[in-house]
Structures are given as structure tokens and as C-alpha cells.
Image: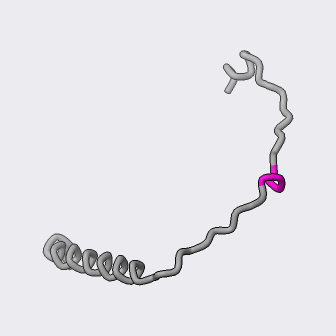
Amino acid sequence: MNIAKNMEAIFVAAIVIASATSFATAAVSTPVIAVKAEASAMQTVTVTAKRLTAAEKAAL
């Protein structure tokens, strides 16, 4: 199957799918509620490592 011959059909099919998806999602009236984490419960990561010297950086 030569894809260059069918490029117009592929383009039209993609537009139809995109249009149907946009109309389907536009019909949803209730907004999606995201759950937020508490600011005090945020996890932190502490990295304790020595810095490379100039000689070690040059060796990399």
C-alpha cells in the first residue's frame, strides 16, 4: 500500500477523529477536579555528595 496515494484519506480521517473528540469532550459539563497535596506534606529530597574537583571533571 503506497502511503502517498492515500495521504488525503489519512488526513481526512485524522480531522474527523479530532473533530469527534473535540465535540465529545465539549459536551462534558462537569469540570474535572484535581486533588492538591497539602503544602506541609510535600516531600523533599536532600542530596549530600561531595563536589568533583577540576581534575575529576577533566577525567570525565
Q: Is residue 2 magenta?
A: no
Q: x%, y% of residue 49? A: 84, 32
User: Is residue 25 or residue 15 the one in the foreground?
Assistant: 25
* Quadrant occupied by the C terminus: top right
User: Is residue 3 or residue 34 the one in the foreground?
Assistant: 34
Q: x%, y% of residue 44? A: 81, 47
**Left-right relation of 57 to 4:** right
Q: Main secondary structure of the magenta part?
A: helix
User: Is residue 40 or residue 20 the one in the foreground?
Assistant: 40
Q: x%, y% of residue 28? A: 45, 82
Is 40 situated above or below 3?
A: above
**Residue shown at 15% from the left, 74% from the top:** 8
* Quadrant occupied by the N terminus: bottom left
Q: Which residues are drawn in magenta?
A: 39-43
User: Is residue 17 or residue 40 the one in the foreground?
Assistant: 40
Is 51 situated above or below 17?
A: above
Quarter of the image for residue 53 reads top right
